[in-house]
Amino acid sequence: MSLFKDIKALLLGFWTTGKHIFLRPLTIEYPEQKRTPFPRYRARIVLTRDPDGGERCVACYLCSAVCPAGCISMQAAGQADGRRYAAWFRINFSRCIFCGFCAEACPTMAIQMTPDYEICNRKIMELVYEKEELLIDGCGKEPEYNFYRHSGIGIVNPRGGNVDEEPPVDVRRLVP
Ligand code: SF4
Ligand code: SF4
C-alpha cells in the first residue's frame, strides 16, 4: 500500500513538471526587463494638487495618525485666507509598509499611492522624502476633485456657495 502511494506521488510530481515544461516561462530578467504593475499597485507615495494647482494637503494629520508604521510627520500652517497647508511634510520610506491606510484616510485625496516600485536605496537617509520630493504637479487619481469646493468650508466661497453644495440649513426654521 505504501509502495503504491509512493509511485502515485512520484507520477503526480512528473505530471506536474510535464504540464509546465512547455509553457511560456514567467521569469522576468529585472532590471533589464520591467514588469508593468496593475494600476492600483501600492508603491511610492505622492502628494497631489487640486485642479486649480493648489496643494491638496490641509495638514489634518489623519494620514499620520492612521499610519501603523509611524512614518509620516508634518507641521501644519495657515495661509492668509485661512486655508491650511503643510509647512513641511515627511515620509520615511524605510519604515513604510505600503499598506495604503494613509491614502484611504486622506479626506482631500492629497496623499496617493502610485505603481512606481523602484525606490529601493541602500542609503537609508535617502529614503526619507521631504515635501519637495513628494509633491507632484498633477492631480493623480480623481482629477476633478477639489476639497475646498466640496467641503462646505467658507474659505473659497461662502457657505452654500460651492459647487454641488446645498445651502446650509437655517436651524431656527426647524424649531416648532
Ligand atoms: S502606506 Fe501605510 S505604512 Fe506607508 S505611509 Fe501610508 S499608512 Fe504609513
Ligand atoms: S495628506 Fe491628507 S490625510 Fe495627510 S495631512 Fe494631508 S490632507 Fe490630511
Image (tube, helix red, strand yellow):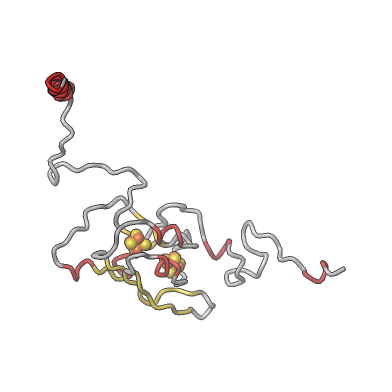
Quarter-of-image position of residue 170: bottom right
Which residue is at 82% across, 66% downward? Answer: 174
Classify the position of the N terminus by image quarter: top left
Residue 55 seen: no
Which residue is at 35% across, 76% downward? Answer: 88
Name the spot of residue 172 as percent of width and height, x first: 81, 71
Q: In the displayed structure, would residue 41 be above or below residue 152? A: above
Which residue is at 18% across, 33% downward? Answer: 26
Name the spot of residue 62 as percent of width and height, x first: 45, 68
Horizontally, is 95 left or right of 32 in the view?
right
Q: In the displayed structure, would residue 47 be above or below residue 35? A: below
Residue 81 seen: yes
Name the spot of residue 139 as percent of width and height, x first: 42, 57
Classify the position of the C terminus by image quarter: bottom right
Q: Nearer the viewer, residue 100 or 7?
A: 7
Ligand 2 in which quarter: bottom left
Quarter-of-image position of residue 71: bottom left
Q: In the displayed structure, would residue 81 be above or below residue 26? A: below
How many numbered marks appear? Answer: 0
Quarter-of-image position of residue 30: top left
Which residue is outermost to the front?
Answer: 1
Which residue is at 50% across, 62% downward? Answer: 107
Q: In the displayed structure, would residue 43 be above or below residue 167? A: above
Name the spot of residue 168 as percent of width and height, x first: 71, 66
Horizontally, is 114 left or right of 7 in the view?
right
